Image: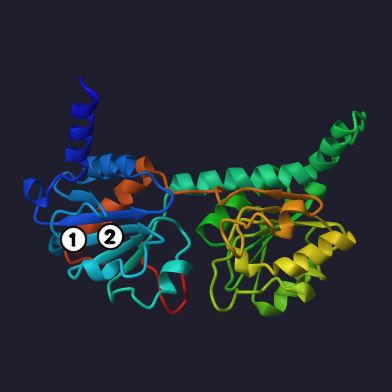
């Protein structure tokens, strides 16, 4: 098959018109996800739905559903008949913060594979500190044999700040590995093997006994800037901070000060106030910092598409959608 023929077939599949499939269409837009895997997974889960990429939509009036991650300004105005917006991820703060969001239900992804992926990343980050791997890495660079006797997991105090769906999955995995896990949430939660506390009054005590802090809160007006200099100072000397939630929850300047002074022993950061992290940002060269580019957990087409399809069926049948976002709470 010639390259021209393959290109034509690909374009034909990508821009297949709604007329050949159904009277309804779903529009897809993402700044970081490939279209083809999502189109294929959604086609398998809901064959009667046309799935089209933004910019190649046959008839915008037929678009009833949107699956999006960080769509551009004015995106929604092109689709006047939307009935549902699904956020391509668990965190919906960027979507809910827009003033051009249509007055339709918004759903977040609730993919069990996202939970497993996040729990795996958090376990990696916690184990890295619990086993003193950064110190061993430094010794390796100096060609120095530096034996560090491993600690019992039960002696390592890990605090998970936020026990939502992803936070709970991470806390349970850490508890399964034998760590002394505490969890903090706005409202009381009960998780086996996790000492759970709730409410603003419990936060100082929670921080004071946490030597490895895992930040897993949603970004809301109440959590923006929550981990400021005063709250970071409540952590024990040498504490490590792992942020897989949202950058603005953590005061980056205060974190840098804590790292520079040695008051904090290290940080693993997957999220930042500005993304991508600017090349001249001081976090790049701060001591004892591991930076990853917002990849701790993502929505996977194969496991998440059935949820998207289920919500579309629910709307068609006049039933409530699952995993709806409450704009008042911000998640």
Examine the image and state in which quarter residue 215 appears: bottom right
Question: Percent position (x, y) of residue 32?
Answer: 44, 49
Vertical side of 186 occupied by 123: above or below: above
* Residue positioned most to the left: 19
**Tags 2 and 1 touching, CB below 8 Å:** yes
For the point 13% across and 47% down, the residue is 48
Q: Quadrant of the N terminus?
A: top left
Disc 2 element: strand
Element class at badge 1? strand
Residue 195 coordinates in the image, percent (x, y): 69, 60
Q: Is residue 162 visible?
A: no
Which disc, if any, is residue 47? none
Residue 177: horizontal and vertical position, in percent? 68, 42
In this rendering, position of residue 164 left or right of residue 32:
right
Q: Which residue is mark 1?
A: 63
The disc label shown at residue 66, or none: 2
């Amino acid at each position: 098959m010639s390259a021209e023929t393959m290109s034509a077939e690909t374009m034909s599949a990508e821009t297949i018109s709604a007329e050949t499939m159904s009277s309804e269409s779903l529009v897809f837009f993402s700044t970081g996800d490939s279209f083809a895997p999502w189109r294929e997974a959604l086609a398998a889960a809901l064959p009667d739905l046309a799935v089209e990429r933004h910019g190649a939509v046959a008839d915008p009036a037929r678009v009833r559903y949107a699956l999006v991650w960080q769509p551009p300004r004015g995106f929604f105005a092109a689709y006047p008949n939307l009935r549902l917006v699904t956020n391509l991820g668990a965190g919906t703060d960027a979507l809910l913060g827009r003033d051009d969001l249509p007055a339709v239900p918004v759903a977040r992804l609730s993919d069990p594979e996202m939970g497993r992926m996040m729990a795996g990343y958090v376990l990696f980050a916690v184990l890295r500190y619990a086993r003193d791997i950064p110190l061993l890495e430094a010794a390796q660079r100096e060609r120095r044999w530096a034996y560090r006797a491993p600690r019992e997991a039960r002696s390592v105090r890990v605090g998970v700040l936020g026990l939502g769906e992803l936070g709970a999955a991470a806390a349970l995995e850490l508890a399964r590995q034998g760590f002394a896990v505490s969890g903090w949430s706005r409202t009381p939660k009960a998780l086996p093997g996790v000492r759970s506390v709730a409410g603003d009054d419990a936060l100082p005590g929670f921080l004071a006994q946490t030597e490895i802090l895992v930040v897993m809160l949603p970004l809301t007006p109440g959590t923006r800037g929550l981990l400021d200099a005063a709250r970071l100072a409540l952590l024990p000397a040498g504490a490590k901070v792992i942020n897989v939630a949202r950058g603005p929850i953590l005061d980056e300047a205060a974190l840098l000060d804590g790292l520079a002074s040695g008051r904090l022993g290290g940080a693993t950061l997957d999220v930042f106030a500005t993304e991508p992290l600017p090349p001249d940002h001081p976090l790049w060269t701060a001591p004892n910092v591991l930076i990853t580019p917002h990849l701790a957990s993502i929505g996977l087409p194969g496991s998440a598409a059935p949820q998207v399809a289920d919500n579309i069926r629910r709307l068609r049948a006049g039933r409530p959608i699952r995993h709806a976002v409450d704009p008042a709470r911000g998640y």
